Image: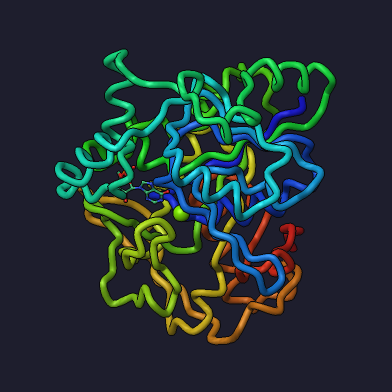
Amino acid sequence: MPATIVIGLQWGDEGKGKIVDLLAENFQHVVRSQGGNNAGHTIQVGEKVFKLHLIPSGILHPGVKCYIADGTVIDLNVLKKEIETVNATHLTISPGAHVILEKHRKEDAATGKEIGTTGCGIGPCYADKMRRVGMRIGDVEDQWLKPFVRPVAPLLHEALERSELVLFEGAQGTLLDLTFGTYPYVTSSSTLAAGVLAGAGVGPTAVSDVIGVCKAYTTRVGAGPFPTEAPELDARAANEIGTTTGRLRRMGFFDAPLVRYAVKLNGVSMLALTKLDILDQWESIKICIEHDDAVPIYKKLPGWKKSTRECRSFSDLPKEARAYIEKIEELVEAPIGLISVGPKREETFYFDGE
Ligand code: IMP
Ligand code: MG
């Protein structure tokens, strides 16, 4: 079956952009189908760093067709700027996607503080969609936009019928899902694998793989519960600065029960573990193995205190890093398929086990 979904298993910023960029060369189509420019994907190609908010991370591959599907909400100013920074000749935007208006941004700025929203107007725009008073891309007259607008779902159906490979790029993370996340400290779309399909208008029988992306530790931006939060961890040293808002992210240890829950909510078939290198200099590493009334119970593992940036296979890793990865795999009940040890494309390898 020709479709794969990439989904975040924590509170966003797991490194989905990098994983999608890496996988995209094997796909003909890459699709964004929920959320809006609250997302921020940082992708490094060589020495060049790209920051994308709306356009799928597949856009950096010239042969890949990219889509912004009906379930998204679009800020036209952000979209226009982004189109100017990449080669967007292979981009299609669906007329059913909703438009974020000035009033949505204003309302979000005025009311989103308690939740710590990105202030992009996402919640108010989705609220208008639900109230059936929203404005859609198909209603917009701007001439620069017109060449990109075409219904996305039928294009995906045709591609799938031709057995072409389609990659769905989730935005935000599982624990920010409107229904299953840490409500009310969540975003306003469904961030789950099923939500991604609902936003694209593609049925689940098209999907063979769900790749769950998680960091080797945890971060969260904005307010809300975070059981393994550890203020002693240095967000700046980990380069954990929000792509969309420039906020310093909250840092914490790996929370295995939460990731296991996310694995099940999405039907994850393979894990991609990112930012392992951030742990390189930690003396010891705590991993949450269970919760007792939302209080984490930790297991302490020894650190490896050397760089993993040059490692290109599982066997290249220090034995303490291998033990940490195997512990994660066991606790979250999903096989690890990809490991990332730095921001660059080449700082990634497929997990080959022992
Ligand atoms: P909103 O999506 O702007 O309404 O914000 C709701 C919550 O989701 C806030 O805690 C945001 O920080 C968080 N959030 C939204 N998008 C992202 C993302 O792409 N990565 C991480 N957190 C996000
Ligand atoms: Mg992000």
Q: Residue at x 42, y 40 (%)?
A: 174
Q: Residue at x 57, y 63 (%)?
A: 325
- In this view, 20 is above or below 126: below
- In this view, 32 is above or below 26: above
Tell me the quarter of the picture where residue 334 sits: top right
- In this view, 243 is above or below 32: below
The one of 150 and 166 positioned closer to us in this rendering: 150
Pinpoint residue 104: horizontal percent, then vertical percent.
27, 35
The one of 39 and 134 positioned closer to us in this rendering: 134
The one of 116 and 180 positioned closer to us in this rendering: 116
Pinpoint residue 232: horizontal percent, then vertical percent.
28, 77
Pinpoint residue 70: horizontal percent, then vertical percent.
52, 23
Q: Quadrant of the N terminus?
A: top right
Whether residue 264 sits left or right of residue 244 in the image: it is: right
The one of 192 and 268 positioned closer to us in this rendering: 192
Q: Residue at x 67, y 74 (%)?
A: 47
Is residue 256 something one can see in this rendering?
yes
- In this view, 251 is above or below 161: below
